[in-house]
Image (cartoon, grey):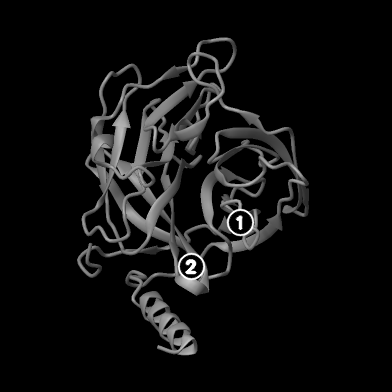
Amino acid sequence: MPFRLVIALGALITLVGFLAVDLGAQTVSDAKLVSATRWYGGEDPAFGGFSGIEVSEDGSSFVAITDRGDITRGKFLRENGKITKVAHGALIKLTTPRGVNVRGIWSDSEGLAIAEDGTMFVSFEVGHRIVKYPSGQARVRNLPKNPATKRMEPNAAQEALAVLTDGSVLMIPEGSANQKTPHPAYRLRAGAQSWEKAFLIPRYRPYVPVGADLGPDGRLYLLERHLSGIFGFTNRVRRFDIAPEGLVNETVLLQTEAGQHDNLEGLAVWRDENGLIRLTMVSDDNFKFFQVTEIVEYVVPEGAGAQIDPLINGQ
């Protein structure tokens, strides 16, 4: 088959796949783009692959991790609320409970969540575990192992983390774009020794979860992504109210066009000086020269989002 025909067929297949994305009924992207700012790391070979981010309550500073087990802290320089520059400190290795730097298959850090007291939780894929990094001088330790990880794919497992208001840790696995069942959300209650399946999140293929955060409004925010072949990445942010019976009032806040941003993987939710919710996201460039590291920020107007009817949208 001629090479040009192969390329043409590949592009057509990709386009068909993109058009088949389940966008959800009455989906409206109400979140408004504030800024998309390139983040540069100079000649540091450790810079890149950012998979998780947390932002301070006032939106001025952040903590970010890479999928090679590095962590950095930094500040956002803003003008009229827009990020104009990103300044960060040295990238340093996360450590194991034994105090040694993570390496090899034990260094694929993906999810990041920070509790109100400063305790940091980091989830790792491949070498499946979630590590608790207490603030101060307390000892680093592994959380109890979740038996469900035995059935998860090595590189599509403990992807998204959030800390709930009661101190529980919530973990949402990435899973596969081909799966048809809802996304499970596992919870480890404060002081507990075993995980429980807390919620089921409606799945709209081919998006998969990559980041999560509990907003200052007490709602759960979920960042999802899909690679639309040669067209690039598309992302979506959904919001849920947390009720005794589960996650309710599912709302789509943001759904980007393919290629609008790079591979957004980390999500932080905070409230700005005007009282509006902001979604701050970081992209994972996979250490590829043709991808970029960027900080993307959206603001959510009051009452924004289209509520999804699960009876209309097949799960």
Give the quarter of the figure containing the C terminus.
bottom left
Q: Is residue 169 left or right of residue 254?
A: left
The residue under the point 41% across, 77% down is 14
Question: Can you tell which quarter of the image residue 197 is in?
Answer: top left
Q: Is residue 255 visible?
A: no
Q: Is residue 189 above or below residue 40?
A: above
Give the quarter of the figure containing the N terminus.
bottom left
Q: Farthest residue toward the front? A: 1
Q: Secondary structure at mark 2?
A: loop
Q: Position of residue 153 (x, y in %)?
A: 31, 45
| Amino acid beneath label 1 | Lys
Q: Is residue 96 above or below residue 22?
A: above
Q: Position of residue 27 (x, y in %)?
A: 39, 70
| Amino acid beneath label 2 | Ser
Number of marks present in the image shown: 2
Of mark 2 and mark 1, the one earlier in the sequence is 2
Q: Is residue 63 left or right of residue 128?
A: right
Q: Which residue is mark 2?
A: 29
Q: Nearer the viewer, mark 2 or mark 1?
A: 1
Pointer 2 and pointer 1: residues touching (CB < 8 Å)?
Answer: no
Q: Which residue is mark 1?
A: 288
The residue under the point 66% across, 42% down is 59
Q: Residues within 10 Å of mark 2 (few under 14, many from 20)?
A: some
The residue under the point 22% across, 41% down is 245
